Image (tube, rainbow, N blue to C red):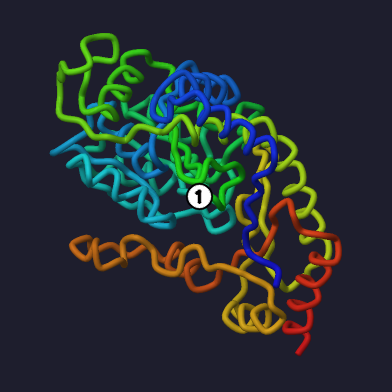
Amino acid sequence: MIPIADPELGEREKERVMDVLDSGQFADGPEVRAFEEEFADFCGASHGVATTNGTTALHTAVEALGLGPGDTVVTTPFSMIASANAIRLAGAEPIFADIDPETYTIDPHAVEAIVRERDVDAIMPVHLYGLPAAMDHLLEIADENDLLVIEDAAQAHGAEFDGERVGSFGDAACFSFYPTKNMTTGEGGMVLTDDGDVAERAASFINHGRDPDGDSYEHHAVGQNYRLTSVLAAIGRVQLDRLPEYNGTRRANAERLTDELPDVIDTPVEPDDRRHVYHQYTIRSEHRDEIEAALDAAEIGSGIYYPIPIHEQPAYSDIERSLPVAERASREVLSLPVHPNLSPSDLTDIVNAIATEVVE
């Protein structure tokens, strides 16, 4: 069986975890602070606040930026539902803009149309599958209309736009360290920002609203317990060291798939101003379901991300909006294995299974 994902945790991670266990400081502490600093530095941001997972990172960022009831955030309908849920958890409302048919990221022209029509407070682009959104255009829209920008970079560790790593563009940015991501802590997340006040509010929010520099039982606001543990931070620090190598292998695997898959398959694009890190290698075909069945018969894992756009989810049935590009993508996309543990023969098997189905 060739799995769609294959997380790799080795001896270095085990050694660092044992060091933490031996220290007796399992919860929040110096190990978490070091991980926050190192990850923020890697992405080119000034501050990092580690959280329990990517969803709590998004929720924390929305709260720390002061968005809540009466506020609106434009985001994509073609993402993990956590993107929109975080907005609603803070009491704000998502407005969905359709996606670019080639990159699957939010279409800036669709965002512009919404901003012209109604009051908007923020934009939350998603760097989907490891490919950055069109940040130049989106930041221009935000600047012209005085909007906040929250990057959902949960799938894009190390991806770049115009030579700069994602996580360094918005008022805040959020990452996930779920096991299938390009680097993992098992579960975990991170909020990045260049704004010290936002970082302080985020650090307070994830710790029951406590003053980060004050008495541990003095609570200045209502918050959550979204703190990352030292054990998971120790894993993350080792994984961050390995991330450039992991991403390089993913890119090499993606290049081979693109070169060898049949021409009738739509393969991922990488615009000249962006560097894809292939959290997912996502193809597109009107015969998606038949290709998925052929891969399954060959014992090759695959995944559909995402089969139901967020605006068509039952949880968002109160939103009536036609978003045809996202709706069509949900019927046609299929993600193939691209992880670093694939062998050359695995890649051959993936190509052959799809080629056989397409020829037949």
Quarter of the image holding residue 141? top left
Position of 332 relative to 248 (above/below)? below
For the image shown, how many numbered marks are present on the structure?
A: 1
Q: Position of residue 197 (x, y in %)?
A: 31, 14
- Which residue occupies the foreground of this view, 52 or 349? 52
> Is 70 displayed left or right of 340 in the figure?
left
Residue at the disc numbered 1: 105
> Is 71 displayed left or right of 77 in the figure?
left
Position of 314 relative to 359 (above/below)? above
Question: Residue 262, can we see it?
Answer: no
Residue at 46% over, 48% down: 107
Residue at 50% over, 66% down: 329
Q: Secondary structure at mark 1?
A: loop
Quarter of the image holding residue 320? bottom left
- Which residue occupies the foreground of this view, 281 or 6? 6
Q: Position of residue 36 (x, y in %)?
A: 49, 23
Question: Residue 85, can we see it?
Answer: yes
Residue at 38% over, 16% down: 195
